[in-house]
Image (cartoon, rainbow, N blue to C red):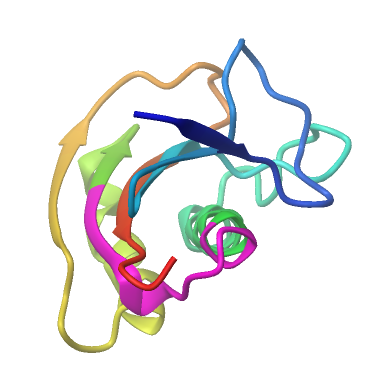
Amino acid sequence: MPRKPIIPNGSPPPLAPYSPGVIAGDTLYVSGMLAMDTSGRTIGEGDVAAQTRAVLEAIKSVVEAAGGTMDDVTFNSIFLKDLADYQAMNVVYREYFPEKFPARYCIRADLVKPEFLVEIASIAHLSTK
């Protein structure tokens, strides 16, 4: 099956060999996003709400670059550095997914750099693409 990388304008530099998103068929796979600006600097150091917002905005930019919307997101994998941040992450998460919630899981995990508090990877179905 052909696949197409999705790299939105203004994406931060990747920390490893990956594409921010890949479309295969009508499915968009969004890599684990971290709270980084276009220069690769951490956004919201020490603030899980600010980092969650930055991560979800990065996911939104990939989904939109692929021609979709956040309503097309069907699954999220959420990684938190500290489960004490679960509630604060969910407050911001609900702003992006107010109803018809995607399926998801959330686990505690060490992230690639100590200043990162949250990482989210997504799957979206773009049936009209």
Is residue 109 placed above or below 121 in the rendered structure?
Answer: above
Q: Quadrant of residue 12?
A: top right
x 76%, y 43%: residue: 11
Is residue 97 placed above or below 18 in the rendered structure?
Answer: below
Range drawn in magenta:
63-76
Please check the rendered image and state whether residue 68 is part of the magenta-colored stretch, yes or no: yes
Position of 117 with respect to 45 (left or right) is: left
Q: Quadrant of the C terminus?
A: bottom left
Residue that extends furthest to the top in the rendered view of this protein: 17
Position of 24 with respect to 53 (left or right) is: left
**Foreground: 18 or 88?**
18
Residue that extends furthest to the bottom in the rendered view of this protein: 99
Residue 61 picture location, percent across and down? 63, 61
Q: How many numbered marks does the figure carry?
A: 0
Residue 76 picture location, percent across and down? 25, 51
**Foreground: 102 or 21?**
21
Residue 91 picture location, percent across and down? 33, 75
Position of 84 with respect to 51 (left or right) is: left
x 34%, y 46%: residue: 25
x 34%, y 65%: residue: 88
Q: Quadrant of residue 94?
A: bottom left
Is residue 77 placed above or below 69 in the rendered structure?
Answer: above
Is residue 1 placed above or below 90 in the rendered structure?
Answer: above
Residue that extends furthest to the right in the rendered view of this protein: 39
Please check the rendered image and state whether residue 125 is part of the magenta-colored stretch, yes or no: no
Residue 43 picture location, percent across and down? 70, 48
x 21%, y 31%: residue: 108
Q: Quadrant of the N terminus?
A: top left
